[in-house]
Each structure stands twice: as C-alpha cells, then as structure tokens.
Image: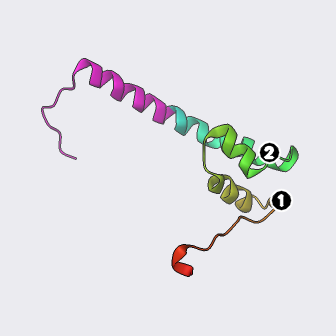
C-alpha cells in the first residue's frame, strides 16, 4: 500500500488511535470469548440469544459456534420465507 505525505490532525489521530486500540482489544478477546461462550452454552445452558444480547454480537455467530462445538441447540433457527418465495 502506497504511503502519502498525509499527517492527521490531532483530533483525527486520537480517534484513529482509539479505533486501532479497540480492534486490538477485540482481537485479544476473540479466543477467550469463544471458549467462554462454548462453556456457558454447554455447562450453564446459555442460549445463542442470551449470548447475543449480552455481547451485542449476532445470534448467527453463536449458532455457528455451537454447531462447530457439537452443542445441540434448544430449537432450530427460524427460517422465514422471503417475499420473493411467495
């Protein structure tokens, strides 16, 4: 990627540093969160909906995580017909 002579303003640089720190923290939490979610679904009965509400992540993320870990979901995901399906 080419570099330019761009130098961000102080407020822009501060915001960009915050975002970078957030992304780095999120990366550090990825594996511990995955392990904890699996444990909570397996041992404490947490549902994908519970975990989605508590983390702000999608139900689908936890649904796929449960499926990959061999955790039986309490109920299958709801599949709705689109308007195109009639």
Q: In this view, does 21 lie to the left or right of 13?
A: right
Point 61% across, 50% down: residue: 58
Q: Is mark 1 on a helix, strand or loop?
A: loop
- Residue at mark 1: 74
For the record, the magenta segment spans 1-24
> Horizontally, is 35 left or right of 72 in the view?
left
Q: Which secondary structure type mostly characterizes the magenta part of the structure?
A: helix
Residue 75 pos. (x, y %): 80, 63
Q: Residue at x 67, y 45 (%)?
A: 52
Name the disc covering residue 83, or none: none
Q: What element carries label 2?
A: helix
Q: Position of residue 7 (x, y in %)?
A: 18, 26
Residues at marks 2 and 1 touching, judged by CB atoms closer than 8 Å: no
Whether residue 32 is visible to the viewer of this picture, yes or no, is no
Q: Which residue is drawn at 28% across and 20% down?
A: 11
Q: Is residue 61 positioned above or below 57 on the image? A: below
Left of 76 or right of it: where is 29? left
Q: Classify mark 2: residues with Cα within 10 Å, few (<14), some (14-19) or many (20+).
A: some
Residue under label 2, please give it: 39
What residue is at 35 percent from the left and 25 percent from the top?
15
Residue 10 in view, yes or no: yes
Query: Residue pushed farthest bottom?
Result: 86
- Give yes or no for residue 46 being in the magenta stretch: no
């Amino acid at each position: 990627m080419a570099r330019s002579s761009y130098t961000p303003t102080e407020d822009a640089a501060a915001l960009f540093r915050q975002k970078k720190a957030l992304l780095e923290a999120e990366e550090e939490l990825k594996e511990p969160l995955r392990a904890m979610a699996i444990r909570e679904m397996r041992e404490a009965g947490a549902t994908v909906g519970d975990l989605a509400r508590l983390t702000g992540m999608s139900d689908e993320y936890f649904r796929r995580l449960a499926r990959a870990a061999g955790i039986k979901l309490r109920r299958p995901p709801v599949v709705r017909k689109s308007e195109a399906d009639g």
